Amino acid sequence: MLQHMEGDVWFNGELLPAKDAKIHILTHSLHYSGAAFEGERAYNGKVFKLEEHTERLLASAQTLQMKPNFSIQDIIFAHKLIMERNNVADGYIRPLIFRGAESMNMTNDILSVNMMIAATKSVPKVATDAHLHISKWRKAHPNSMPPQCKSSGHYTMMIIAQQEAKNSGYSDAILLDWRGYVAECTTTNIFFVKDECLVTPIADAFLNGITRQTIIELAHKLGLTVKEKHIELHEIMKYDECFMTGTSAEIKRVQSIDMSEAFDGKKKIFEDNRISNLLTTEYSELVRR
Ligand code: PMP
């Protein structure tokens, strides 16, 4: 059996074997993709920034007009239960809030709001350097898709962009926003470095990741300058270093960005890794504190 299907899941307040946590084929969120979810990491038995993740989960559910039956405290306690049950100290945790199968209408008051939490053992992958390209797809205008809502619908485009990147031999893709500014990668935020100054796009059209915010705080504590700005594609050529950030990937150094499809036939190679190495060490210590 697949590793993530072993053990138990927390499902609507109960702990039950993952293989028995069945949902109906007409589940609304499967058809219309209106589910809210999180991706979290536990270190030494503690989920890093659990409160922030749970607040974001509940805010995403609210944006999707779902009222879960569980409070922030209930959800935090449920994490403890499922992690203990599955004996997860270092792991990946996936809470999901979704509509049930009571109706095939787009909206209907009889639709239930359900919640599950899966906790699996996992340690971050040994980071290999990433090779990116620029996706032809752009992040939706903030008036078309709420960027701070971590909804399954949002990931339709991220799946297409990531699969296309992999099919072409890249690790991942950078997506631009509707204005043509650099936004983020498919499941991570992005940072550049020039002369010990971190430069990252303003999070006005993409998810303001919890790891992104953590890295900005960490950089300030280390006395580094951080500039949040709109970044145009051609600016990438002048940076010395680049890395991606996300809960699952943590910090992943970018070695190259192929911009040939998007900008003047250029490929940018990043030679430096001093700042990403420093932040990786500091982040790794912080999450285990
Ligand atoms: N952007 C996208 C599209 C993501 O899916 C993620 C992962 N949640 C991130 C950024 C990074 O967010 P976080 O640091 O909160 O994991």
Image (spheres, rainbow, N blue to C red):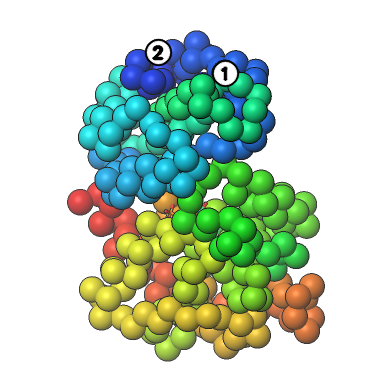
Local crowd at mark 2 within 10 Å, few (<14), some, or many (≥20)?
A: some
Q: Is label 1 or label 2 in front?
A: 1
How far separated are the C-alphas under marks 1 and 2?
Answer: 22 Å
Measured along the vertical axis of the image, is residue 43 above or below residue 8? Answer: below
Residue at (31% x, 50% y) in the render: 52
- Frontmost residue, 145 versus 121: 145
> 171 left or right of 5?
right
Q: Residue at x 25, y 80 (%)?
A: 223
Residue tagged 1: 102
Quadrant of the rendered image containing residue 73: top left
The location of residue 102, given as percent across then percent down, is: 57, 18
Q: Position of residue 197 (x, y in %)?
A: 39, 84
Amino acid under disc 1: Glu
194 or 204, which is in the foreground?
204
Q: Which SS class for mark 2?
A: strand
Q: Which residue is under mark 2?
A: 16
**Chain-order first, disc 1 or disc 2:** 2
The spot of residue 46 in percent (x, y) is: 25, 40
Instruction: Identify whether 81 is placed above or below 185.
Output: above
- The kind of secondary structure element at disc 1 is loop
Position of 112 compared to 47: left or right? right
For ligand 1, tell me if the residue under mark 2 lies within 8 Å.
Answer: no
Task: Give coordinates of residue 251: x percent, y percent.
Answer: 44, 60
